[in-house]
Image: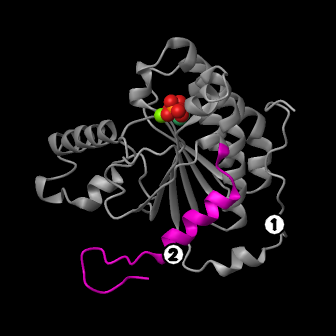
Amino acid sequence: MSIESANIINLDASSTTSASESAISNLPTHIGVTMDGNGRWAEARGKARTEGHREGIKALRMLVESAIRYKIPYLTVFSFSSENWRRPKTEIDFIFKLMRKFVESDLKKLIANNVRVRIIGERDGLEKGLQKIIQQVESKTAHNTGLNLNVAFNYGGRSEITSAIKSILKDVQSGKHTIEDVDEDLVARSLFTAGIPDPDLLIRTGGEKRTSNFLVWQSAYAELVFLDVLWPDFDEKSFMSSLKQYASRQRRFGGIETVK
Ligand code: IPE
Ligand code: MG
């Protein structure tokens, strides 16, 4: 079955909770996922890198489905970074086409599952048609109250912070804010993720142990889980194992008491 015609989120609200699922306590409110390893997955099979991206969309659908089932309030996925422009044009075009198709073909199911979609990242410079699709998916899901799915697309953490600084400086210049108004809360409210709680858990597949400009400000106290599995192979077991690792961490946020 081609991804275009594949069924996406087949869940309904009455979906049952499995025994293993209910055994995980202390679930994160916000999970960020860097979906890495598509190219290597394809290369290992003698296929073009693009085939890995195509396969990766299936893992993304599975992840969204699992997040809904586990009632995770916020999920942010890193789908294209500001730095990915360094790749060959053919690969970039393919990723863009794929994300576009994902949004278009899955929109109905996302709406049916009460998912609110936001696209975070730089929009200027994106093709007009794509900008329109982004606006549509956001407005059509804006009133949904289930999973908040944030797609980081053309996103870079440093660029996001730089834009926030510019917008705050403009407001100081125009007199809307004084320098004394500038605090961590104002910075947070000036980011793409304004109003979204910081991620509790960041998962990165593909074996690399770095955060690569993902949610730089927001992940200050996130628990990091690095998995060797390549993104197209990420399955519910990988998701559960990440949740279990998270549940076993002791979060102190700089204090001495474990915060639950
Ligand atoms: C992640 O997989 C997908 C994107 C960055 C768009 P990669 O394409 O980085 O795959 P590897 O890391 O080369 O295997
Ligand atoms: Mg990579």
What x and y, as percent, mark residue 219?
A: 36, 57
- Residue 143 placement: quadrant: bottom right
Label 1 environment density (alpha carbons within 10 Å; few <14, some 14–19, many ≥20): few
Residue corresponding to mark 1: 13
Task: Reply above or below: 177 against 160.
Answer: below
Direction from residue 160 to residue 109 in the image, left or right: right
Which residues lie in the magenta part? 233-260
The type of residue carrying mark 1 is Ala
Direction from residue 106 to residue 34 in the image, left or right: left
- Please tell me which residue lies in front, 183 or 35: 35
The type of residue carrying mark 2 is Ala
Residue at 40% across / 30% down in the picture? 82
Which residue ends up furthest to the left in the rendered image?
Answer: 179
- Please tell me which residue lies in front, 84 or 106: 84
User: For disc 2, does the CB lie below 8 Å from ligand 1?
Assistant: no
Residue corresponding to mark 2: 247
Residue at 68% across / 25% down in the picture? 51
Q: CA–CA distance between discs 1 and 2?
A: 25 Å
Q: Nearer the viewer, mark 1 or mark 2?
A: 2
